[in-house]
Each structure stands twice: as C-alpha cells, then as structure tokens.
Amino acid sequence: MAQKDYVSRGRTPQKGNKKSPTKKSPAKKQANIKADTSHSAALPWVRLIVVVALLVGFVVFLWTIKDSAKQKVDAPVSIDANKDKDDLPQLPEEEWEYIKSLPGYEVEVDVAEQEKSDKRYLMQCASFRTRSQAEEMKATIAFQGLESQIRPSTGANGEWFRVILGPFETKRDAERAKHTLRKVNIATCQIWFWNL
C-alpha cells in the first residue's frame, strides 16, 4: 500500500482564481503620458483665470463700499453743547399694587400644639467594659457641645459603663442631638424613655 505525501506535493494551482497582471504595450504607455501631460497643462491656466476673476471681483466690491463709508464718516454729528444733564426726560413712576395690598393681608395658620407629656427621654450612645473607654467617648461628645454622663450598671455579664445623654424634654431634642453626634461618626445612639 503506497502512502501519499500531501505536504511535499504542495498545492495544486486552481484555475480561474489567479489574476495575471496585464502588460501594456509601450505605445499605450506613451499615449497615456501624453494625455496626462495635456490635461495637467490646461489645469494651471484654468486656476489662473479663476484667481484673477476673484481678485477683480474683490476690488470692485471694495470700490463700491468705499463711497458709502465716506458718507457715514463725513456726516456731521449734532451735539448740542448747551444741553445740561438736568434736561433728561423724567422716568415714569412705577406703581405696584402689592405694596398697597400686602399690609392688609393676614395669614392664619392652624398649628397643633405639641402635647407635653411627663415622659422624658434619654439617649444611650455606648456601653463599655472599662471606665477609660467610657471617658474617651464622653470627651468626644463634649467636643460637640453636648453633655453626657457615665453610669455604671451591674448585670449578669458583669459591670458595664454606659454613656448616656439627657434627660430630653421631647424626642425631637433627642433626635437633634443624635444627628449632631452622627457627624462625628457616633452612630450607635439609641433613644429610650428616661427610667433611671
């Protein structure tokens, strides 16, 4: 059995796919050169004629506007030197109706009074195992202009030191203090009823 060696044989040329370059005869080359030369020789004359026509048109345009510019400049400007600044026309006075009508208006707003309750609020911001950590938190809160307290508490888990603020008369006051502390990254505060 004979094996065929396809690699060494190479590819067979395919018919119709290859385009052979067409060779021009020397006579055709000379004819093309003469046509190109005559075409390029006519082109500078056309350009020259167009440039001259544009220049002539521009000069004519300048000549026509020259007279109108002289008329505008030569026209006398009438300035009356005897006029005073006081001779200016009077400005009309503006009349605004709202100036007259606003003083008589009254706006009535019904505001529900806030009920005062006997409840007072406290805010606990942290609870620490050591008193020194609680003192650090108290100092940070004091730099924000708020007063806090440290309250020790004993529970099933041992002794803790709670940092609390208050008492606040309304929950709104407690929320205001909570937002102030949030600006310095103390976001662990919780608002409760005062029951200590």
Image (spheres, rainbow, N blue to C red):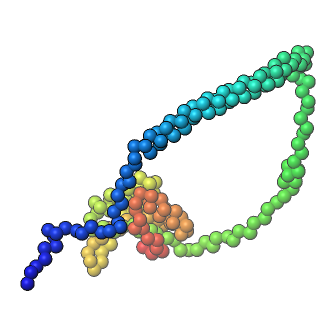
Query: Could you tell me which residue is drawn at 16 percent across and 69 percent down?
Result: 9
Relative to 8, say whether 96 is above or below: above
Residue 97 in view of the camera: yes
- Along the line of sight, which residue is nearer the eye, 156 or 28? 28
Report the number of discs: 0
Quadrant of the frame with the C terminus: bottom left
Q: Residue furthest front?
A: 27
Q: Is residue 33 left or right of residue 138?
A: right
- Along the line of sight, which residue is nearer the eye, 40 or 155? 40
Query: Could you tell me which residue is drawn at 57 percent across and 35 percent down?
Result: 43
Quarter residue 152 falls in: bottom left
Quadrant of the frame with the N terminus: bottom left
Quarter residue 17 falls in: bottom left
Q: Is residue 81 left or right of residue 64?
A: right
Q: Residue furthest top?
A: 81
Q: Is residue 47 left or right of residue 2?
A: right
Residue 114, percent across and down?
64, 70
Residue 33, percent across and down?
46, 39
Query: Could you tell me which residue is drawn at 19 percent across and 67 percent down?
Result: 10
Residue 46, percent across and down?
62, 33
Residue 82, percent across and down?
91, 15
Relative to 118, say whether 163 is above or below: above
- Along the line of sight, which residue is nearer the eye, 94 or 112? 94
Residue 58 in view of the camera: no
- Along the line of sight, which residue is nearer the eye, 65 or 126? 65
Q: Residue furthest left?
A: 1
